[in-house]
Amino acid sequence: MAHKQTISLCATWLTLLTLVSSGHIFAETGQAAADQETEVMTVVGTRTERQVNEVGASISVITAEELERQITRDIADLVRFEPGVSVSGTGSRFGLSGFNIRGIEGNRVLTIVDGVRVPDEFSFGPFLDSRRDFVDVDSIELVEIARGPISSLYGSDALGGIVSFTTKKPSYYVSDAEGFYADINAGYSSDDSSLNASTTLALGNEQIAGLISYTHRDAEETETQGSSGYTAAQRQEADPQDIEVDSILAKLEFTPWEGHNFLLSYEQFEHTNDAQILSDYGAFVRGTLINSRDARDERERQKWVIDYHYDREEGWLNHLALKVYQQTGTSEQLTNEMRTAASGPQTRFRYSEFEQEIEGALVQFGSSFNTGEVAHTLTYGVDYYATDNKSLRNGGTFSLDGTPLFEFSPLPTRDFPITEVEQIAYFIQDEIIFLDGKLRVTPGVRYDQFDADTQADAIYLAGNPGTELPQDYDDSEVTTSLSVVYQLNEAWSTFARYSEGFRAPPYDDVNVGFTNPLGGYKTIANPDLVSETSEGIELGLRWDGRYGDMLLTVFSNEYEDFIDPLSLAPQFLATGGIDPVDGFRTFQSVNRAEVEIDGVELSGLVELGELSEALAGFGLRYSLAYADGEDLERDEPLETINPLTAVLGLVYDAQSGRWGGQVVMTLVEGKDESDIASDSERPATSGYGIVDVLAYVDITDSITLNVGLFNVTDREYIRWADTLSIGGDAPERFTQPGFNAGATLKVVF
């Protein structure tokens, strides 16, 4: 089925290409091209600054101004109007997950802030779930989202795509003419009763400048549309939460000579959540009554970066970038319980911690030269980074008088041994321009080598008795890419791209270790895991002219050796997963054969004012994303695929530029049983449509008000991405908020 859809989509693309080439759709005059808006620039697609239309890939670019006008508070809001990209996490105490791009999610999507990877996701059991929401959107200047495999530029984890954040820096705000900048931005959102305040201060000139940005946010739980405040599985309302976020960004920029730029950056992000998990109050676990369960979860990210950039037009070396960085990310999760067991009342606590430290360096060179009438831009370099990874679980159970009670699993323990992973890569890419700029061909190749060294310390050994000693492992991967962009005329262009991705075997899958005698199961290591790999083909058609713009993309991605975490150990399948030596049901991470995802995406803007003077200032923005995924080994649908989604927005900007707004309709198809794996416990979802209204007004030259009205029809719905967490709970607790509103006020001094 997926192959037939891909063939059909490719045929559609080729038909459109033929029509455009023969001039049967739209022609564009030179004057019309001159009327086009300034091109949006991107770096993520080629590691060089290029106009989006020059890159052979589907890339979204979101500016700081767009983030402000859309009342963006977190990474989920950031992709609210991005079909094909989502962030889940509704109904969970652990917060938002990472990004899902075209059905690939988690650590298979590379997420970076100023070129540095954010900490991995890691979960183990009910009390440890470290997620990737480590980003303060108020500190962001630009977001770039590249869809599909892109490891030939960025290495491991860019299996399904990349989300790149660029934070504010001094030169965006000050110059020799304007040496001072300051702003205050305050906001409120009713769906979580959040109050948000941020400020940015920049001082200096074009030679030396500094910036400091600070954000504070207080919030409660995000409301659902459930009406019941009961406890346990009957609870429909969100569990009460008290959330506090603090983020600080500081940068010092120095340009001593023309073409030389130094940038020193420091960033600290802290998130604290105190929660009453009322949805667990009154639950029974193995015959024990949970009277109460409360939690305190903290996550923190600290980062230092030193950047140096050298640019010149003459000579063989036109660009040099050097980056050195260090980052520590920590998630700490504490759970306290009051319980009643057969032996009487008890108290219990569980403490979990996941910490990842990364240190790295990047050296990137750029050389531009000509061979005859062909222009080349060569990008090449070395990328090195090392991560130190460790987890810790501890806990205890006590009688009411404080007497320690027996624990069936040894504590403290580690779910995997302390592991250091080193990775070094060498990459090269050549952007080749033919035919007076009409044809751009970009081949690229990257070689990655990684080594993992494990340390089985006393905590790991004591917590995993009888487990085989962990093993070091190493591997290497070569990934390639090839893109072609052809400018058919001044308005129309087309592109094709082949790209590869990979993800190195995760340390927690290779050497996982855990035994639960009470539950009668254990997890064991698998040092034979190999890297997950992907191949992607993408075909695109672009139009950018007087009457608007359009991008049509069809894609087909194949993924091999997917790592399935903690499946029944293959060596014990004949005995139902039971290890005959100890009688424990045994789980192990294994490679699966093949997954395929095909789809089509359409986005663009129609400038209605160019069609009629009566519609001056109006525009129609549209986007659509459809994907179909299949686990070919199991002949089952791939459940990480989001349903067909379309976004249609009527936009207005006054000719004065002082005010404007948009009405946005989002339409999402339901998921029926035919789209869900036969052994899945996820419920089917209904389709839905919601309407949001956004508006802005520049009250003065220095004061801007942004207002958002969301889900104005008060539609009750559940996003497919959130159904994974429902289980035996009330589905209403995972619904999105009903009608809600938000506003921000920004003052620039």
Image (cartoon, rainbow, N blue to C red):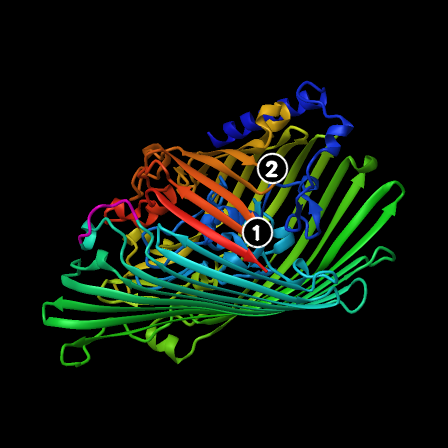
Query: What residue does disc 2 label?
Result: 538
Quarter holding the C terminus? bottom right
Q: Nearer the viewer, residue 585 or 240?
A: 240
Q: Position of residue 285 (x, y in %)?
A: 18, 60
* Residue at image point 35% right, 73% down: 413
Q: Position of residue 268 (x, y in %)?
A: 51, 69
Relative to 615, residue 567 above or below: below
Main secondary structure found in the magenta portion: loop
* Residue at image point 68% right, 30% down: 545
Sequence-wise first label, 2 or 1:
1
Query: What residue does disc 1 label?
Result: 64
* Residue at image point 83% right, 36% down: 436
Q: Quadrant of residue 536?
A: top right
Residue positioned most to the top: 24
410 relative to 201 in the view: left or right? left
Q: Amino acid at mark 2?
A: Glu
Question: Which stretch did the figure color magenta?
Answer: 224-230
Q: Residues within 10 Å of mark 2 (few under 14, many from 20)?
A: many
* Residue at image point 43% right, 71% down: 417
| Residue 574 belongs to magenta span | no
> Would you say residue 631 is visible in this rendering?
no
Relative to 81, residue 325 above or below: below
Q: Amino acid at mark 1?
A: Ala
Label 2 sits on a secondary structure element that is strand
Q: Nearer the viewer, residue 543 or 189?
A: 189
Q: Nearer the viewer, residue 280 or 632?
A: 280
Q: Position of residue 618 (x, y in %)?
A: 56, 31
